[in-house]
Image (cartoon, rainbow, N blue to C red):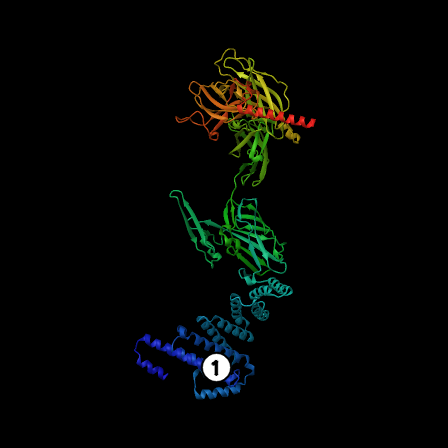
Amino acid sequence: MQIYKERLQRVSTNSDSSQDLRNEFAVMLLRYSLHCLNAIFENMVVFKIPRDCDEIQCWIVSFCLETMQITSLLTEITHVEQAAHLTCSLKLATCQAMSKLNKRWDLVDWKKIAKWFEDGITQCGVETIIRFRQLLFDKQQFTHYMQKYHESSIALLKHFGWRREARAVGWELAKFLLSSDRAEGALPYLLNFISDLISDGSTVLLLRDTLLFTVNHLEKFPGIHFKELVDFYLILMKLAKTEKERIKYCDKFLELSEKPSVTKIRLNSNCNQRKAFSFGYNSSFPFLIAIPNETIKIDAKVISYLPKSLKNFKLYCYMKSFVQNESQKRTAGRRPHFECMYSETDGISRFACDWKGDIELRKESVLGFSMNLTNESEDYLIFQSSATDELRPGENILTLIAKRRKSFEILYSAEFICYNAVFKQASESSGTYIFDYFELEIGHSLLLRCNWLDVSEIEEDLARLPICFIHHKPVSLKLKPPPNDGVLLAGVAQHVEFEISYGTAELITDENSVLQITCSAGSDLEFWDVSKSKWSEICNYSLDRILPGNNKTITVHLYKILRNLSNSEENVKSGLPTSVAQILVKWMDEEWSFTVNFISFMNIDSDTSLLEESVLFELALLRSIDEWLIMPQDAILSRISNDSLQMPAKLLNPKLTDIQPGCKYRLVWILPPNKGKTDEVEHYELRFTYRVKSLDEHTNEDELIYDREYTLFDEFPPDYELCAQLLSSQPGAILCRVDDACDMIVSLRSLTNRVETVVVGIDADPCFWTISQKHKLVHVKESGLGQISFTVFPKIIGFLPYPIISVYSCRHKRSDSDISQLSNESTYDFGPQLSSFVRTNGKQVHVLGAFPTSSDSKSNASVKTNRLKEAKSRITKLFD
C-alpha cells in the first residue's frame, strides 16, 4: 500500500491516470494473491501436508475474502478484463473451500478452530476474518452466506465467460441446498445445470446420472415440482437403457398427468430430449373450402413416441380467423422467401427477397405474414377428438369433432391422415381461417402445444399453411364431360349428365323445382321430355325437394339431327364430320350455356355418272365402327325446281337392307330429265329416314328412348361441271401405252358464276395408274371456265377406267403472283369438297403394250441361238 501511495503522488492529478493506476494495482494484487495461493498448494503437495484439513479451508476463505475486499476498495473488478482469470480462479478456490467446510460441518472441532482464529485475529485483526469467524459458529448464517457468495460467484463467472465453471459452482450450490432440505432453492440451479448439459451435447451417461440424482430429490415433493418431474420423466424415458425402464418412467409420467391441477402445465414441444409427440400434414397444400352442411377432408399426421398407449387425452386443432392486408408483403417463417415478377410493358423480370428468414421466429410473429390476426374475442375453429380414441405408439388415426366459436358450429372429422369436417351454419356470416396450432391435453393437468412454425411441412414451405374458407355457395350446374374424349354421336340418341349443386340457398319449392333445357337457334337438337315421354326442342326436368348443400346428378337424353354432311369441312379427307351445339339451361333465375361437340356416326359421299342418255346419282353411306345397327326406312332424292313441285328421282336399288358398323352402303338414283332447260342449275335434296338398334344390351327404358325414326337431311347444289380427256404425251402418238406418260386434261365450268380458286384432285387404283401429283390449284376465271393438266402413267394393258376427279374449295386467296400449279401439295389449304357433275365418269381408255426397242431384239436373238445350241448338245449326248 505504501508503494501504491508513493506512485500515486508522482502521477498527475488526472482522474483517468489515477483510475488506470488503481486498476493496475488491483490486477497486481490479484496476481500475487493467486500466485501465493498456488505456491502454498504446491509446497503442501511437496511436503505431503493434507489439504483437506479444516484450518486450511478456513485460511483459504479468509485469504481470498481479504484479497477481494482490498481490490473492491481500489476499483470495480468486473470492469477490468485483465483480471478475469485471476478473479475467477480466486472465486473458485473460495467456493470449493466453503463446500468442503459444509460437508464436514458435523465433524469439525470448532473449539480448535475458534482458538486458531483467535490467534490469527490477535496478529492481524482484519475485519473480514472477524466476520467469517462469526459465521462459522452459526450454521444458519453460514448457510445463508454461502448461498449468497455462490450466487455472486456464478454471476461473476458468467460475466467473464466462464460458463462451465459457473455451471459447476451451481451444481455444488444445488447439492448444498438439497443437503440443507432446501430443494426449492436448489431447483433453479439443477435445471440450469441440466439445461446446459443438454445444450452442450454432454454424454448420455452424465445427463442420465444427473437426472436420476435430481429426480430422487424432487419425488419427495411431487406437488411442488410437478412440471419438472414431467419433463425429467420424458427425458429419462428416452435415455432409458431397457424397454422395462422406459415403461417405468412412462407409467410415472402418466400417473402425474392424472393428478388434478388448478392450472394446467404446458410442455415444450420443440425440445428433442423430451419430445413425446410430433404433428404434421401429409397433403401438399391443405386448402379447405367449406359451406354449411358440407363434409371436407384434410391430410394430417401425429406420431407418439411413448412406449405405451395413451387413452385419457384430448386433441385440439385451432384455426383462427384473419383479415388479409394488401399493403403488406406475405413474409414470415424461419426460411427466406423470394418473389419473382415479370412486367409485360417493359419486358423485365425482377427477383427480390421479401423475407430473409429468422431462426428465432416464434408463433407470435404471425403478423409478419401480412395478416391482421383477430384478438381473443374473434372466431376460432376448434377441432376436438372423441373420448373413445386411443393414441398408440407410432402413427395414429383419430376422429376429431370441431366447433367454431360464436357464429358457426362445425363438425370436423380427422383421421390424422385425414380430417373430415361437417360445417353447420348458425348465422349468415362467413370467414377465412388459418391454422394456428395443435394442442394435446393429456390427463387432467398436461398440455402440449405445437405452433404452426413447428410443423415441419410448414417450416419448409410457408405456402403449405392450412387455410379454410367458409362461404355461402350459390346454386350451380355443371355438365359432366361425356365419355369418348368428350364427344357425342350425332344422328342417334345420346345422353349427358348434369351435376346440380343446391348450394346454401333456400329449400327447393314447387316454384323453383323445374329445370328447363333447350338449345340455341340452328343447333338441330331435340331432348327427351321425361314427363311427356316424347322428343321436343324444350325439356322440362322436375327436381325433388332436397336440403341445401346437397348435390344431384340428372341424365338428359338428346339427339343431334344429321344435316348437310356433304358440305362438311371434314369431308375433305373422307373423315367423320363434327359439329358444335349450344345447350341452354334455366333454373332458379339463373342461366347456363354449355358447348357440346358432336361427331357423326356416319358420313356420305356422292358421285354422278352417265348411263347412255341418263344421269346416275350415287350416294355412299360410310359407317364408323360402333355399337349401332342402322335399319333404313326410306330414301328419297328430289330435284328442287323454282316453277314446279319437287321431282323425286328413281331409286334403282329400292330394297333397303340393314347397315352394319364399319361397312359402306350405296344408293343409286336415275336423275329426272331437265326438259331442255340447260342453263338452270339443278338442285337436289336428300331425305334418308332410318332407325337404329344397339348391338349392346339396353334396358327397356333405354329402348323406349332410342326406338324412334331418325332423319338425315342433305342438299346437293352442283357447283361445277367437269370433263376429262386422256392423251399420250409422246409426239404423234394417239393411244396410251404402258409406263408411258399420259396427259389427263381436266376442264371445269362453274355453275355458280363465282370467281374463286379451287383444288382439283384425281385419284386411282395404284394397280392401274401411277399419279405423280394428285392435287393442283385452278383459278376459275370470270367466264366460269378453268383447265388443268395432270401427268399419269398406265400400269397394265387393257381398257382402264378414268381416274376419279374431285373438286375442293380452297382458302387460298388469289394474288397477282399466283400461278395455276403449285409444286408442294402440303401447302394446300383444303376446304370442303364441292358438289360437282363429272361427265366422263365411267369412261374408259384403251392402253396398249410398250414398243419393243432394238436392244430387246438383239437380246431375243441371242437367247434363241443359245437355246438351239443347248438342244443340239443334248441330242448329241443322247445318241452317244
Q: Please name the residue that numbered disc 1 is placed on.
A: 60
Number of numbered markers: 1
Rendered location of residue 467, percent (x, y)? 51, 49
Residue at far left of view: 12
> Horizontal and vertical percent for residue 503?
54, 40
| Side of 158 where 250 appears, left or right | right
877 w.r.t. 376: above or below: above
Quarter of the image that includes the N terminus: bottom left
Q: Residues within 10 Å of mark 1 (few under 14, many from 20)?
A: some
Q: Is residue 129 above or below residue 336?
A: below
Q: Residue at x 56, y 83 (%)?
A: 107
Q: Residue at x 30, y 76 (%)?
A: 14
Q: Position of residue 676 (x, y in %)?
A: 50, 11
Q: Which sits in the foreground, 675 or 199?
A: 675
- Quarter-wise, where is residue 864 in the image? top right
State the image quarter where residue 863 is shown: top right
Image-based side of 39 in relation to 239, left or right: left
Q: Residue furthest front?
A: 880
Residue 364 at x, y percent in the picture: 47, 57
**In this orientation, does residue 186 appear?**
yes
Task: Identify which amino acid the numbered label 1 is placed on.
Answer: Ile
Position above or below: 797 against 485: above
Residue 482 in sight in this render: no
Q: Residue furthest right?
A: 879
Which part of the image, by quadrant, shows the C terminus? Answer: top right
Identify the element where label 1 is drawn. Answer: helix
Placement of 164 over or under 380, stated as above or below: below
